[in-house]
């Protein structure tokens, strides 16, 4: 299958013998509006479906030298965003298989947030995805991550707002309550179970 607009991620180039110290960075592609998206070819049909309602930008987050994490940033409106990619939960690596959708990060952006809560918008995003005909996604999952942790400081490059009370434990409770999330049988790089969200497509792909 040929590449689509949803798989052409910005590339990080760094000279092999560069003497400039490495710095964490995020590269953004151009925003694709809902109207513009209808003119593009998509690699994944679920992204085409989402693009009918949500504008998006591709990005590559370079956390350490030689490695970049790729995701699609969807604008949930009102300055709220969620990053997604197709990821194999067994390896925590990007996958061509759309069965498992990973919610990389959800946040409010400091400059554009309209003051309305994020989680209802994220729920609407998932409910819309459940309406897709022949939906290929079987599992939606995430991590409850406190972005104030020094090991997660690269996430601040998105321009997110930091909530003082958004600890990993509190976020986990929110996901369990709001999305009926449960511990999955796959673990993240820290050895903690991913949180598998309640996701029930009305018309699953056979």
Image (cartoon, helix red, strand yellow):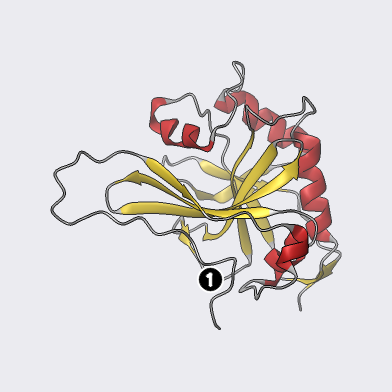
Q: Looking at this rendering, what residue extends furthest in the bottom direction? A: 1
- Side of 23 where 107 appears, left or right: right
| Res 201 quadrant in image | bottom right
Element at label 1: loop
Name the residue: 49% across, 47% down. Answer: 187
The percent position of residue 206, horizontal first and vertical second, equals 76, 79
Q: Which one is in front, 196 or 77? A: 77
Residue 34 in sight from this viewpoint: yes
Q: Which one is in front, 64 or 33? A: 33
The percent position of residue 107, horizontal first and vertical second, equals 63, 35
Say few, some or many: other residues with alpha carbon within 10 Å of mark 1 (under 14 / 14 to 19 / 20 or more): few
Q: Which one is in front, 6 or 127? A: 6
Q: Looking at this rendering, what residue extends furthest in the top direction? A: 164
- Side of 22 where 155 appears, left or right: right
The answer to whether residue 92 is above or below residue 81 is below
Identify the residue under disc 1: 96
From the image, which quarter does the N terminus lie in?
bottom right
Name the residue: 77% across, 24% down. Answer: 115
Name the residue: 68% across, 64% down. Answer: 47
- Side of 201 where 26 appears, left or right: left
The percent position of residue 156, horizontal first and vertical second, equals 49, 32
The answer to whether residue 161 is above or below residue 37 is above
Residue 189 in sight from this viewpoint: no
């Amino acid at each position: 299958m040929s590449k689509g607009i949803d798989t052409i991620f910005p590339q990080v180039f760094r000279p092999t013998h560069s003497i400039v110290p490495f710095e964490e960075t995020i590269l953004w592609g151009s925003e694709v509006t809902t109207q513009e998206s209808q003119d593009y070819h998509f690699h994944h049909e679920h992204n085409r479906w989402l693009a009918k309602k949500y504008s998006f930008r591709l990005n590559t987050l370079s956390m350490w030298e030689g490695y970049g994490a790729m995701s699609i940033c969807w604008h949930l409106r009102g300055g709220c965003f969620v990053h997604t990619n197709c990821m194999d939960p067994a390896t925590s690596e990007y996958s061509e298989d759309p069965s498992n959708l990973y919610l990389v990060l959800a946040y409010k952006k400091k400059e554009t947030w309209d003051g309305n809560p994020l989680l209802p918008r994220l729920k609407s995003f998932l409910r819309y995805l459940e309406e897709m005909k022949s939906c290929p996604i079987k599992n939606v999952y995430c991590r409850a991550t406190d972005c104030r942790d020094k090991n997660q400081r690269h996430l601040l490059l998105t321009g997110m707002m930091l909530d003082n009370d958004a600890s990993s434990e509190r976020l986990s409770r929110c996901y369990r309550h709001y999305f009926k999330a449960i511990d999955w049988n796959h673990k993240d790089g820290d050895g903690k179970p991913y949180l598998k969200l309640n996701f029930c497509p009305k018309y699953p792909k056979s």
